[in-house]
Amino acid sequence: MKGIINMAKLSSINKNNKRIQLSEKFKKKRSELKKIIMNKKLPLEERFKAQQKLSNLPRNSSSTRIRNRCQITGRPHGVYRKLKISRIALRKLGLEGKIPGMIKSSW
């Protein structure tokens, strides 16, 4: 069992993928509404309407609800942002020699 990497629950991986899709879909609309809300020169009533429209958008369309997960295992913790791989998956790939320039350390 030492060589096997455990996968995260498929439901949590799918939920996160759905959030990513919703975030991309509503990105432009959210940014436009936020610009209106932050513009202090506009009347308060108009800004309030924009705030209501923003709150009526799906919660999962917010980029802050996206979880940083490993692309291989779906692991939510210990994920390198640049590589989008968890520390455990990175180590396994390094040991298999699939990452150029990465060697097993020993001392």
Image (cartoon, rainbow, N blue to C red):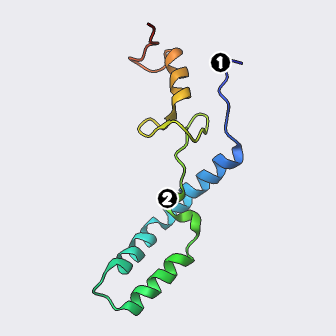
Mark 2 Cα within 10 Å, few/some/many (few <14, many 20+)?
A: few
Q: Is residue 76 above or below residue 105?
A: below
Res 18 quadrant in image? bottom right
Q: Residue at x 31, y 80 (%)?
A: 39
Q: Give me the disc on residue 106.
A: none
Question: Where residue 42 appears, x then y in whole percent?
Answer: 31, 88
Mark 1 Cα within 10 Å, few/some/many (few <14, many 20+)?
A: few
**Mark 2 vs 1, N-terminal side:** 1
* Left or right for 49, reference 16: left
Q: Give me the disc on residue 3.
A: 1
Q: Is residue 42 above or below residue 55?
A: below
Q: Is residue 12 above or below residue 37?
A: above
Question: Where residue 4 appears, x then y in whole percent?
Answer: 67, 22
Question: Where residue 44 appears, x then y in whole percent?
Answer: 38, 90
- Dot 2 lies on which element? helix
Q: Which residue is mark 2?
A: 64
Residue farthest toward the left in the current orientation of the protein: 41
Q: Residue at x 49, y 15 (%)?
A: 97
Q: Residue at x 55, y 21 (%)?
A: 92
Under mark 1, the amino acid is Gly
Considering depth in this image, is 84 or 78 the residue closer to the camera? 78
